Image (cartoon, helix red, strand yellow):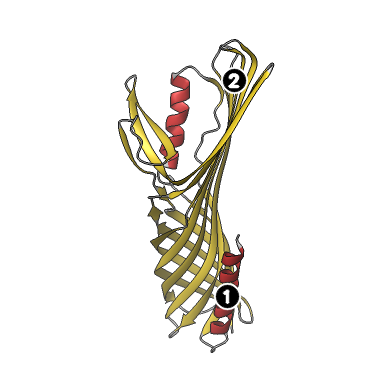
Amino acid sequence: MSTRKAALFVLSFLLLVALAQAGPAFSLKLYGGAGYWLTGGDFKPLFASTADRWREVGYTGTFDLDWKPIAIEGGVQAVLMFNPRLGMAFGIGYLSKSINQDSMLNDGSGATVEQISSYKVQSLPVSLDLLYYFVASEPVRINLSVGATYFSSLVKVEEHSLYKDPNYLGKLNWKWDLLRTFESDRKSVLGFQAGLGAEIKLFGPASLCFDLLYRLASFDDIQGTLRESDNVTWTGGHESGSATVDQTQMWYSTADVWGNTWHYLDIQKGEPTTVDEARPFKISMGGPVLRVGIKIGV
């Protein structure tokens, strides 16, 4: 987390503490949890299509291309109760989704390809929820919530490919090491959520909290900076190069090949032209979220 983001998080936390001390109707709620991203937007169909494409062209080996839906999050909320049943909650938090893949491919000729890929989505959510407690008496209180969240997100992609061929175009022990990294500009999006929560009285002002939410939030038009570096070696030779390209964009493209529709992630400047269709890559944070926390009244 950058210094600027850390400072914003600390200042927001201090604001929540100050609000919580304003009167007996306030309480602080600290929580951690996990979200289940149903598809991640275009991620899940992209990974499935990539595995199908490699099998179709004759690659064998280990294809670690399963969609991994779990995202980790945590945060703090200041809860203001207008009366025993009706209240509102203002929160700030941190959300992180990482997918790491390592696939080893063999084309049957002695050449191999190792693909190591990392996809990360990091977000700072600021939320506002309305709460209605339809069970308002202790020791167990149950509420319904509905609200909106402002997400400020970054996307990072790293693709590392290592190609090996014992005799590529007459070059013995030929190896090509290619690294591509992409970091997006900060992207803002407004999402919505609704859920069911329960609070179990522990002792004094403290309660154990459980919240099950369903979130709707997605974004596209993901632009940023792409950096590429490659290193080619063979017995008796060596070549290398690097490049940095600003204002690149993540694209989701499709092409019909051999009666199949294959899907691609392209990161480049300008819309891809060598495919049948292309559109901005979409990332969805939508799906169920489970949170567990401690609420302390002031």
State whether residue 68 is above or below residue 173: below
Residue under label 1, please give it.
11
**Residue 103 visible from this viewpoint:** no
Q: Quadrant of residue 204?
A: bottom right
Where residue 223 appears, as percent x and y from the top left, is: 43, 49
Front residue of this view, candidates 293 and 218:
218
Tell me the CA gap for discs 1 and 2.
51 Å
- Under circle 1, the secondary element is helix
Where residue 75 appears, as percent x and y from the top left, is: 56, 66
In this view, which residue lies farthest toward the right?
236
Where residue 143 appears, as percent x and y from the top left, is: 44, 71
State whether residue 241 is above or below residue 119: above
Tag shown at residue 112: 2
State whether residue 105 is above or below residue 178: above
In this view, which residue lies farthest toward the bottom?
23
Where residue 186 appears, as percent x and y from the top left, is: 47, 57
- The amino acid marked with disc number 2 is Thr
- Under circle 2, the secondary element is strand
